[in-house]
Image (tube, grey):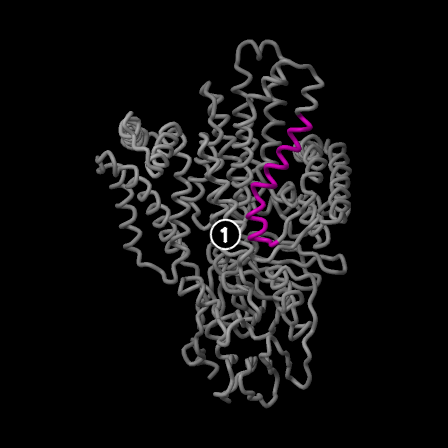
Amino acid sequence: MWKNPSFLIIFLRFIRISQKYPLSFLKFLRNHFHKKETSDSVFMKILNYISISFYNDFQRWLLWLPVLVGFGISLYFSLSFEPPLWVGGLGIFAFIFSFIFVRLRVLHLLAFSIGFIFLGFSASLFRTHLLNTVMLHYPLSPLVLEGRVQQVELKPTLKGTFYQRLILTDLKAETPEKLPQKIRVSLKGKRERLWPGQRIQIKAKLLPVSEPSTPNGFDFRRQAYFNGLGATGFSLSPPTILKSDFHWRTYLEKRREEITAYFLEKLPYPKGAIAAALITGDKSSIPDSIREDFVNSGLAHILAISGLHLTIIAGFVFMVIRRGIALIPPLCLHYNSKKIAAVGTILVTFIYLILSGFGIPAQRAFIMITAVMGATLLNRTALSMRTVAFAALLILLIMPESLLGPSFQLSFAAVVGLVSGYETWKNPLAHWIVNGGRLRKLIVYGLGVSFTSLLATLATLPFTIYLFHRFSVHAIEANLLAVPLTTCVIMPSALLTCLLTPLGLGEGPLWVFEKSISLLIQIASIVSTWPGAHLWVAHPPLFSFILVVFGGLWLCLWQQSWRKLGFIAIGAGFLVGFGGKLPDLLIDGRGKLVGLYDGSVLYVSSQRKGKFTAETWKKHLAVRETEPMTCEEGLCKMTYQDIPILISYGQVTHPCVKDAILIRLEPTKITCPEALLTLDWYDLWRHGGHALWLDSKKPYLETVNQAQGRRPWTRKAIQRKDRPRDHKND
């Protein structure tokens, strides 16, 4: 593609237009508002201030291109219906028209921005249609499956053992049902260790992917759709290995899992699980208690393959190669050691990217490292914030759904905050270091680690609250200890272990790797016990989250004084967040659980069923404890704001009470016109989970399907008579 002269001409034309058009527009603003006869009205002064700031900051406007694409992606996913494919083609045409045919001086920048919004929308639409993942909408009867193992995860049990969780593709079964392209199946108990590439046969029970537990909650089905996963399930028989069919994709996956198995075998548990997470990105073997310690102490980012790990590897490799060349005078005198080190760094980081499983943060870091090393090869200096914008734009166009994932949001929020902060403070600090000695360098290093932790914590705080409903007060102190340990000891020893183990020389680095991981676990465990280590925050309104994110982008992407206006949006977002009203009554879409929230305690209809849903509700409402409802003989009775609430389940006579809320978790055709509201199993089957607000005389109701709309990944209520039937067994 890059060798095609026509492609290069189009690419260079795009760069010229993207620089020329905004510049001409800004010259128009400068000539119009820099007149001496400027009006003294408040409106004109504000408009004049904005135009001058925009003109002085015109070189930064390109940084908003991924934001515009992200807005188009958000617009697509916010729809309650699936637009036809021709709308995507229209969006691409609008994008091309915006930067080729528009010549008006005043309108071209607006058209250019709208064109990128259309580009994000069209990229999302095409991505959805190209995947075309088959989703299961109802449980299937047990059936004998044949499929190829694509991935194997080792999940820990309460007894300290492991069970396997498989990703199977290329499925075959004697059933009239249309099987998904990919499923996830758990193998309970001790089973033969399976590897990617093996073709197996098992008897399994397949279930649809779970819906969100609350309206506007995290959509597991949407995530599964874009991962190509159509169903989950569990095995009912031991797997039978039919044959092994390896190709390059399964070969790479098998190498990753062999490295994971090596660390789990060589290092004591759970150190081996954390070592595997740092090397291959496989976090499935980490016990929940250790994972919670890292989350509560603000060190969860260390367990994920993020930009930090890839940057450490890149810096270590670059330093080793360049210093090694310096020790060989003939090589150092005849070749540019910096450029050789840059090439070696790109190769090693790419290998690490493959081993880590191509996570979104790792992709972002690799793109940025490649851009920086490419600039080194060309004797140029890479512009950090533009590199971040380029990485974000590239990832969003290839995988638009990544915008909605925690990995993309947290990774780019942290790096944008860090780059913006160091753009502001690097020159004063550099001047202060030059005029001082080693003591100043040590002080700057210590303050730099603290400043980095503070920036990353503040930048990711809105996303942590909105996505996980918690944040750590002591994240800065924990990172002050853990980041230098990870940078100077853990990752270098991990790299040396991987490089020297095939040569039989990996025992020394592995010992250092083990001891440093043990110290890291102790840091996370100690900090997580401090008072205020983790604070629960109730789910904020979406509008407040948008205000805070927009204010943060405004603060970080501009450089002139008008960037401070971002604090207004951030402050307004936090104020709006405190005004959100949480639901009073939550109902699980599968009819297993009902929760009543009275402002402090969550009362649940069962403490045995729907444990995962109950935990999700606790986080959503920021509740510390749950209590059981008063239930007997298949009927739970509660009263909230003088409104009787009756929850019936099992084979009981469903009561009818005037001005009450009746929730019937079993199918029934008994009506109750006197009730304030009646919800039965059929409502849950059709509309998914429910959330009710009981402040007024007439309860306000939201459902999961109402919030989701009718999209390719949403569950459909298909009646039995409309399902495929196996006539052989009729």
Estimate the x, y position of residue 88 in percent, counting from the top left: 31, 51
Q: Position of residue 227 (x, y in %)?
A: 49, 54
Residue at image coords 34%, 39%: 43
- Can residue 14 be spotted in the picture? no
Question: Quick one: which residue is furthest to the front in this view?
Answer: 40
Left or right: residue 39 versus residue 592 is left
Secondary structure character of the magenta stretch overall: helix
User: Disc 1 marks which amino acid?
Assistant: Ser
Would you identify the image quadrant in which residue 616 lies?
A: bottom right
Which residue sits at x=58%, y=62%?
185
Crowdedness near tag 1: few (<14), some (14–19) or many (≥20) residues, C-alpha within 10 Å: many
Numbered disc 1: secondary structure:
helix
Instruction: Tell me the quarter of the image containing the N terminus.
Output: top left
Total labels: the figure holds: 1
Q: Which x, y percent locates residue 636?
A: 64, 81
The magenta segment: 445-469
Name which residue lies at 38% across and 43% down: 68
Q: Nearer the viewer, residue 24 or 605?
A: 24
| Residue 380 visible (yes or no) | yes
Would you place residue 659 above or below residue 230 in this image?
below
Q: On the picture, is 275 further left or further right than 119? A: right
Residue holding disc 1? 544
- Say which residue appears at 45% left-offset and 42% top-offset: 395
Taking 128 as reference, is 58 above or below it? above
Q: Position of residue 706 (x, y in %)?
A: 44, 67
